[in-house]
Amino acid sequence: MVKVEGERLVAYRDTNGTLTIGVGHTGLDVTPGLRITSETSRVLLLRDLAWATNCVSKNVHVALTEPQWIALVSFVFNEGEHAFMTSTLLRLLNAADYASVPTQLLRWTKETINGRLVDNAGLVNRRAAEAVLWNSRAGAELSTPTRALYVGAP
């Protein structure tokens, strides 16, 4: 996960008004005033990341470096499975157009306020961090055992 947001141990409403806690955890178990520990926050994050890693694993059909993998999991975790699966980003990536991915990431910075699409500073920062990570030379192609660590598969 790209570190662009902090951990909040008391439930709060995000910019969309969604009750959130920890590192982006939402759901019916989040109630106003809920307090959790850092340990609980980490457990929730790992559980929440499972669907995002599975989405990347199922839908990306080209080799990725570890930083690229992490950038995509961060993106999917934030934007959702449907957005990723129907994105130009995924289509271009699966056509092995790796160079287009950072530009595609940077397109996902808007939120709707009063019926208008405007840049959200948090999303601008998140996408910039993901693009930098994508372009990182660190790491090599993920082997099956390394990929399994991310998706929790044997």
Image (cartoon, grey):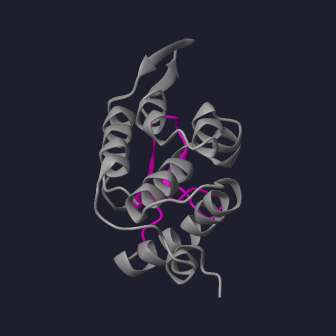
Locate residue 95: give its quadrant: top right
**Furthest residue toward bottom:** 154
Say which residue appears at 65% left-offset and 88% top-offset.
Answer: 154
Query: Which is the main secondary structure of the residues drawn in magenta?
Result: loop
**Furthest residue toward front:** 96
Say which residue appears at 58% left-offset and 64% top-offset.
Answer: 53
88 left or right of 13? right
Q: Nearer the viewer, residue 111 or 151?
A: 151
35 left or right of 28? left
- Give residue 86's position: percent from left, percent from top: 71, 36
Q: Nearer the viewer, residue 39 or 72?
A: 72
Q: Nearer the viewer, residue 15 or 55?
A: 55
Q: Is residue 120 above or below residue 97?
A: above
Looking at the rendering, the stretch of residues picked out in magenta corresponds to 10-36
Locate residue 91: give its quadrant: top right
- Give residue 15's position: percent from left, percent from top: 45, 35
Q: Is residue 47 above or below residue 2?
A: below
Say which residue appears at 57% left-offset and 79% top-offset.
Answer: 144
Q: Is residue 150 magenta?
A: no
Q: Is residue 21 magenta?
A: yes
For the N terminus, give its image quadrant: bottom left
- Give residue 73's position: percent from left, percent from top: 51, 57
- Give residue 63's position: percent from left, percent from top: 54, 60
Q: Is residue 94 above or below residue 111?
A: below
Q: Nearer the viewer, residue 28 or 151?
A: 151
Q: How many marks?
A: 0
Q: Is residue 44 above or below residue 106?
A: below
136 left or right of 14? left
